[in-house]
Amino acid sequence: MAEAPVAVVSGANRGLGLEVSLQLADRGFDVVMGVRELRKGEAAARGRKALHPAILDVADPESPARLAAEVRAAFGRCDVLVNNAGIHYDTGDHAWSPDWRVVREAFETNLFGAWRLAEALLPLMLERGRGRIVNVSSEAGSLASMGSDTPAYSTSKAALNALTRVLAAELAGTGILVNAVCPGWVATDMGGAGGRPIPEGARGIVWAATLPDDGPTGGFFRDGRPLPW
């Protein structure tokens, strides 16, 4: 029997991260659910054998490397990374009067955390000559439509989009596809009531995580359709 592919999903104990984990498990993946509290991860996994909660705090510079070592020891491979962990939708804040604590925390998680996790897990993908990295972004980070409000969140997501482009270019020809996905306004704890259902938002992320070998790389998508940068 062929080995099941392995996906790592950050911020996976609730909302989009949990739903993406469930949908990938339904597609035959073993899913390492990155969570800050193991107890909450175990409860979210609901006893499903394909879901494997593991401690991950992307704001801790050492945590991604520890998780990568655990993934290597347990599975020997990583086929998909979904950088889902995100923080600080800072509605009502202003760039001309920033809360620097919020700005730093937003970049630490939304950009540096994703960057560290990619760095830690890329060796496992490069060894197999195949992989998918999905950076869960937001249209709030699109320069084409960016305006006022949410300065920390918007600029950190714009930076995540830039990282997507750089990684995709550097990894061209390696079999590793790197894309950014905006799930839209989703009714999560961060998004609030009134957004689209969580499973609907997660499907576009799963689409990018399961692209064929000739799929796009270095793109920005919602529901499989390109968005302007």
Image (spheres, rainbow, N blue to C red):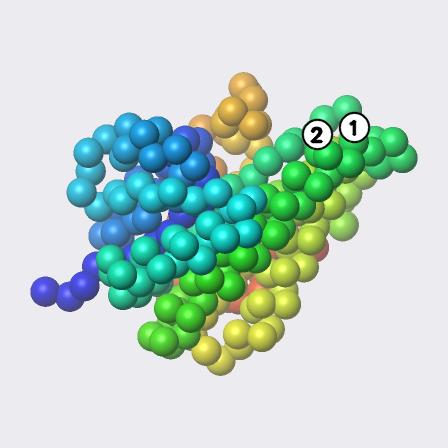
Q: Is residue 107 above or below residue 194?
A: below
Residue 63 position, x and y percent, is 46, 50
Return the residue nearer the eye: 5 or 205.
5
Q: Which mark is residue 108?
A: none
Residue designated by label 1: 93
Q: Amino acid at mark 1?
A: Asp
What is the x, y in percent for residue 107?
Answer: 67, 45
Toward the bottom, the furthest residue is 173
In the image, what residue occupies the spot 56% across and 22% down?
192
The residue that mark 2 highlights is 90
Q: Label 2: few (<14), some or many (≥20) within 10 Å?
A: some
**Occupied quadrant, residue 155:** top right
Compute the Cα span from label 2 to label 1: 6 Å
* Residue 25 point in image, percent of width and height: 26, 46
Q: Label 2's element?
A: loop
In the displayed structure image, the side of residue 194 where residue 67 appears, left or right: left
- State the image coordinates of residue 120 (x, y, percent, origin top left): 46, 62
Could you tell me the amino acid type at mark 2?
A: Asp
Give SS at disc 1: loop
Residue at the image position 45 percent from the left and 58 percent from the top: 65
Quadrant assignment for the N terminus: bottom left
Q: Nearer the viewer, residue 107 or 19?
A: 107
Count the labels in the image: 2
Q: Residues within 10 Å of mark 1 (few under 14, many from 20)?
A: some
Q: Is residue 109 left or right of residue 210?
A: right
Given the current orientation, which residue lies at the most extreme front position? 62
Question: Is the Cβ of the residue at disc 2 closer than 8 Å to that at disc 1?
Answer: yes
The extreme left residue here reads: 1
37 vs 51: above or below: above
Q: Is residue 87 left or right of residue 128?
A: right
Nearest the eye: 204 or 170: 170
Residue in view at x 63 percent, y 64 percent = 165
